[in-house]
Image (cartoon, rainbow, N blue to C red):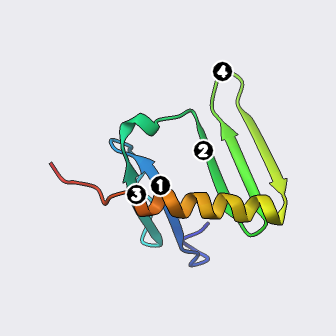
Amino acid sequence: MLKEKHIKEKVLVVQGSKYVGNENSEILYLPKKFTSQTYTVIYGDFIRISIWSDTPYFIIIKNNDLANFHKKQFKVFWELSKPKRNK
């Protein structure tokens, strides 16, 4: 859906991830020590937290202050991340 609507996304994944994205995806990689069963999506004033466990949970929060905090946190991780290294 992002591809068809030409929506660009920035994605942080851990090294070794199989996530490939699409031509609208800009992907950077974090060290494996950041591996988690959760992930967060930030869009506008919304934060979606997905928890992949035996019983998956999805939490959606609409809050401008919280969204801005997560965007700032994402920016810090983005600046610490690296492009994928080919072996």
For marks 1 and 3, the one nearer the N-term is: 1
Q: Sequence order check: which comes first, mark 4 or mark 1? A: 1
Q: Position of residue 35 (x, y in %)?
A: 46, 35
Residue 33 figure quarter: top left
Q: Look at the numbered discs 1 and 3 and tell me whether their residues touch, using CB distance below 8 Å.
A: no
Residue at the left extreme, as displayed: 87
Q: Amino acid at mark 3?
A: Leu
- Please name the amino acid that badge 4 sits on: Asp
Mark 1 → mark 2, Cα distance in angstroms: 10 Å
Marks 4 and 3: in contact by CB < 8 Å?
no
Within the image, what quadrant is residue 64 found in? Answer: bottom right
User: What is the x, y in percent for residue 80?
Assistant: 40, 57
Looking at the image, is mark 3 or mark 4 nearer the viewer? 3
Q: Nearer the viewer, residue 51 or 33?
A: 33
Label annotation for residue 39: 2
Where is mark 1, residue-wise?
A: 12
Q: Is residue 59 left or right of residue 78?
A: right
Residue type, label 2: Tyr
Q: How many residues crowd mark 2 within 10 Å: few (<14), some (14–19), many (20+)?
A: some
Determine which residue is flagged by label 3: 80
Residue shown at 59% from the left, 68% from the top: 2
Q: Gap between marks 2 and 4, in whole Å?
A: 15 Å
Q: For numbered disc 4, what is the local secondary structure?
A: loop
- Circle 4 is placed at which residue position? 54
Q: Residue at x 43, y 63 (%)?
A: 79
Report the label total: 4
Location of residue 49 in the rendering, given as x and y in whole percent from the top left corner? 70, 45
